[in-house]
């Protein structure tokens, strides 16, 4: 199990890991399990400004398509290129190799993110 | 509260993700849809299909009754023979798609779980002259599908079943359980469907998994069943057809035998041109990995020209596949696109099925 003490979570099941002004974003283990086999990710190009709480992309599994919401604001500095060929990394390692975006100049202007305990309580795990 | 099959405890114990389907609490997946899909294409998979309905027609008038209800020609069936067909309303719309088995003393018709209530009412209303019975609750259905399925099941049967032809069934025992063993399926692979008494289903389920585990047999849920059937170009009632769809409009004209005499819907179907039906059913592939889904719009020159009936990602072909129902006047060579949640994806018409199992496999 990944050490999630430095991760923060949205009620829409994204996670963010902030390191200085950099922020990595992905979806939670609970979310990937609900979606099942991930097939396709629609992610914004590098340079896009994303805003906390707004849609930044979409994820499709065999079962369903879901929108993705940014936990924090910032500028897209990098997208996880491995997901183009191996979207299933979101299933196998949601907090590690299955990350989606890295933001620069990240700022948490939402303020309503959950910590690990809060998120665990939310999903009833 | 959703109904349960006799194998419900097995699914829960195996940690399956359960979903409601056709009024039943059914396993969607035990591991992942991809793993279960690949198992069926390369080894074998075990399905609980006990949610499917079964009705029987017996008595002197049984043939005439079933012949009037179903579009295909039931009279050509010998005992043990089976066929696929549809039931139509008088107006030609499809009530359900069915498999009809001829048994020693009548006919068994297999119906979709989601249609059971309306089907039983419809068939009951048109059963005069026969003894009609809904036996769904006392019959369990297990399917073993995949290239290793025939060898596995054959080795567990009291009688020879490996030589059973497609769409034929025989009564025997499997692992000591009395069963009707049918060379049918809904995956595009070879294999059997096993009709047994509901009370025998858990024991047979366990015996199959124990005997087949070494050959890679794993339990498979409705998720893989859907991706497998779509690759194989097989229709799903409620998505690819419904009460408003005539058989020609979903490319099931081959199940309509007008020459057999009048049946329910035959008059309406006679008025249709089989080669130019009101709607055209096509297989399409999409550029990119986005999945087209039921109800999404198909576009020609940016204008609505039909809709997606079923869509998924093909694990065997590694691209997105779908079936679509096009307006009848869409030219065969029109350039199609699908509106996938606001993104227009170019689509290419391809022949069905998307996947055909290798010869001899």
Image (spheres, coloured by chain):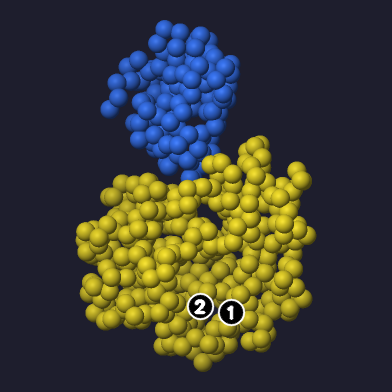
Labelled pair 1, 2 in contact (Cβ < 8 Å): yes
* Separation of marks 1 and 2 at Cα, in angstroms: 8 Å
Q: Residue at x 40, y 53 (%)?
A: B37
Left or right of residue B303, residue A102 in this image: left
Label of residue B282 in the image: none
Q: Which residue is mark 2?
A: B83
Left or right of residue B181, residue B90 in this image: right
| Chain painted in blue in the figure | A
| Chain painted in yellow in the figure | B
Q: Which residue is mark 1?
A: B72
Query: Does any portion of residue B2 appear in the rendered image?
Result: no
Left or right of residue B210, residue B80 in this image: right
The spot of residue A54 in percent (x, y) is 58, 22
- Earlier-in-chain disc, 1 versus 2: 1
Q: Secondary structure at mark 2?
A: strand
Taking depth in this image into account, of B122 and A94 the one nearest to the observer is A94
Task: Read off the chain for label 2.
Answer: B
**Number of other residues with Cα within 10 Å of mark 1, as a class: few under 14, some 14 to 19, many 20 or more:** many
């Amino acid at each position: 199990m990944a050490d999630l003490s430095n991760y923060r979570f949205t009620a829409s099941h994204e996670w963010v890991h902030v390191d200085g002004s950099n922020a990595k974003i992905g979806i939670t283990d609970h979310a990937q399990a609900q979606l099942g086999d991930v097939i396709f990710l629609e992610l914004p190009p590098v340079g896009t400004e994303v805003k906390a709480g707004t849609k930044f992309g979409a994820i499709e599994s065999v079962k369903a398509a879901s929108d993705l919401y940014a936990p924090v604001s910032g500028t897209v500095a990098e997208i996880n290129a491995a997901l183009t060929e191996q979207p299933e990394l979101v299933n196998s390692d949601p907090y590690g190799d299955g990350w989606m975006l890295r933001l620069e100049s990240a700022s948490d202007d939402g303020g309503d993110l959950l910590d690990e305990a809060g998120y665990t309580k939310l999903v009833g795990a | 509260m959703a109904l349960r099959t006799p194998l419900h405890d097995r699914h829960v114990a195996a940690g399956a993700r359960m979903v409601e389907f056709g009024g039943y609490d059914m396993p969607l997946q035990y591991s992942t849809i991809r793993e279960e899909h690949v198992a069926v294409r390369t080894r074998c998979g075990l399905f609980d299909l006990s949610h499917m309905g079964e009705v029987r027609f017996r008595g002197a008038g049984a043939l005439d009754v079933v012949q009037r209800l179903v579009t295909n020609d039931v009279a050509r069936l010998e005992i043990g023979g089976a066929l696929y067909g549809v039931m139509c309303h008088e107006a030609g719309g499809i009530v359900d798609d069915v498999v009809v088995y001829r048994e020693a003393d009548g006919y068994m018709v297999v119906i979709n779980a989601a249609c059971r209530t309306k089907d039983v009412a419809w068939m009951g209303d048109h059963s005069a002259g026969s003894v009609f019975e809904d036996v769904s609750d006392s019959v369990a259905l297990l399917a073993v599908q995949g290239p290793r399925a025939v060898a596995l099941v054959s080795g567990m049967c009291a009688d020879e079943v490996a030589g059973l032809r497609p769409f034929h069934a025989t009564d025997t025992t499997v692992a000591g359980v009395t069963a009707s063993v049918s060379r049918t399926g809904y995956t595009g692979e070879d294999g059997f469907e096993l009709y047994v008494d509901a009370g025998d289903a858990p024991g047979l389920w366990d015996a199959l998994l124990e005997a087949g585990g070494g050959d890679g047999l794993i339990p498979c849920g409705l998720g893989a069943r859907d991706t497998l059937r779509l690759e194989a170009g097989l229709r799903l009632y409620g998505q690819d057809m419904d009460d408003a769809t005539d058989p020609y409009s979903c490319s099931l004209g081959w199940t309509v035998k007008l020459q057999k005499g009048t049946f329910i819907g035959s008059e309406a179907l006679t008025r249709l041109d089989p080669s130019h039906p009101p709607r055209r059913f096509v297989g399409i592939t999409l550029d990119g990995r986005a999945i087209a889904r039921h109800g999404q719009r198909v576009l020609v020159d940016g204008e609505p020209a039909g809709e997606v009936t079923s869509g998924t990602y093909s694990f065997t072909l590694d691209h997105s596949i779908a079936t679509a129902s096009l307006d009848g006047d869409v030219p065969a060579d029109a350039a199609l696109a699908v509106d996938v949640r606001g993104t227009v994806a170019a689509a290419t018409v391809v022949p069905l099925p998307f996947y055909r199992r290798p010869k001899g496999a």
